[in-house]
Amino acid sequence: QVHLVESGGDSVQAGGSLRLSCAASGLTYSTYCMAWFRQAPDKKREGVAHIDSDGTTSYGDSVKGRFAISASDARDTLYLQMNNLKAEDTAMYYCAADICPVAILTPSSYGYWGQGTQVTVSS
C-alpha cells in the first residue's frame, strides 16, 4: 500500500525559502512518477512540479525558475525547494504519485496522495 506523508510547511515572509519533503512508502515499482500540487481556498488544485521515473522534471508556469523538485535515489523521499516565495504561493501543498506514464500535472492522473502541508507566505 502506497503511503505519502508531507512535511516542511511553514509561515514565511515573501522572498523567503522553504523545502518541503514527502516520505513515500509502498512504491514497489521503479517506474513511479511523482509530483507536487497545491490548492488555495476556493481555488482548483494546481500542478506545481512533476518528476518522471528517469528524473525528467516539469513545472507549472507560475513556479518556473523559483521551485525545484527532486527525489532521493531510492525514491523514498520527494522534495520541493521553493525560493523567492510570493504571497500567491500560499496554499496547502500535496505530494502525489502513480505508475508512469501519467498526464503530467493533471490531478486525476495520480492515484496516490498525501494529506498535505500548509505553506503561508506573508507580504
Image (spheres, rainbow, N blue to C red):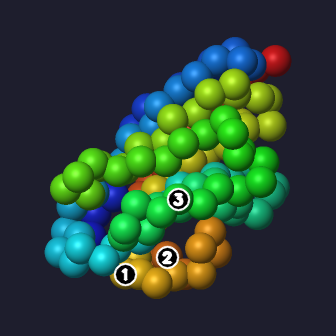
**Amino acid type of the residue tagged 3 in the rendering:** Thr
Look at mark 1 in the image and give the residue it sits on.
99
**Closer to the observer: label 2 or label 1?**
1
Sequence-wise first label, 2 or 1? 1
Look at mark 2 in the image and give the residue it sits on.
110
Q: How many marks?
A: 3
Q: Foreground: 43 or 57?
A: 57
Secondary element at tag 2: loop
Q: CA distance from mark 3 to mark 1?
A: 16 Å
Task: Indicate the quadrant where residue 100 lies.
Answer: bottom left
Secondary element at tag 1: strand
**Amino acid type of the residue tagged 2 in the rendering:** Tyr
**Amino acid type of the residue tagged 1 in the rendering:** Ile
Measured from the top left, where is residue 25 in percent x and y? Answer: 21, 61
Q: Residue at x 79, y 29 (%)?
A: 87
Q: Residue at x 76, y 63 (%)?
A: 44
Q: CA distance from mark 2 to mark 1?
A: 8 Å
Q: Residue at x 44, y 68 (%)?
A: 52
Task: Indicate the quadrant where residue 46 lies.
Answer: bottom right
Measured from the top left, where is residue 15 in percent x and y? Answer: 72, 18
Q: CA distance from mark 3 to mark 2?
A: 16 Å
Question: In the rendered view of the protein, which quadrant contains the N terminus?
Answer: bottom left
Question: In the rendered view of the protein, which quadrant contains the C terminus?
Answer: top right
**Closer to the observer: label 3 or label 1?**
3
Secondary element at tag 3: strand
Measured from the top left, where is residue 108 in percent x and y? Answer: 59, 80
Look at mark 3 in the image and give the residue it sits on.
57
**Closer to the observer: label 3 or label 2?**
3
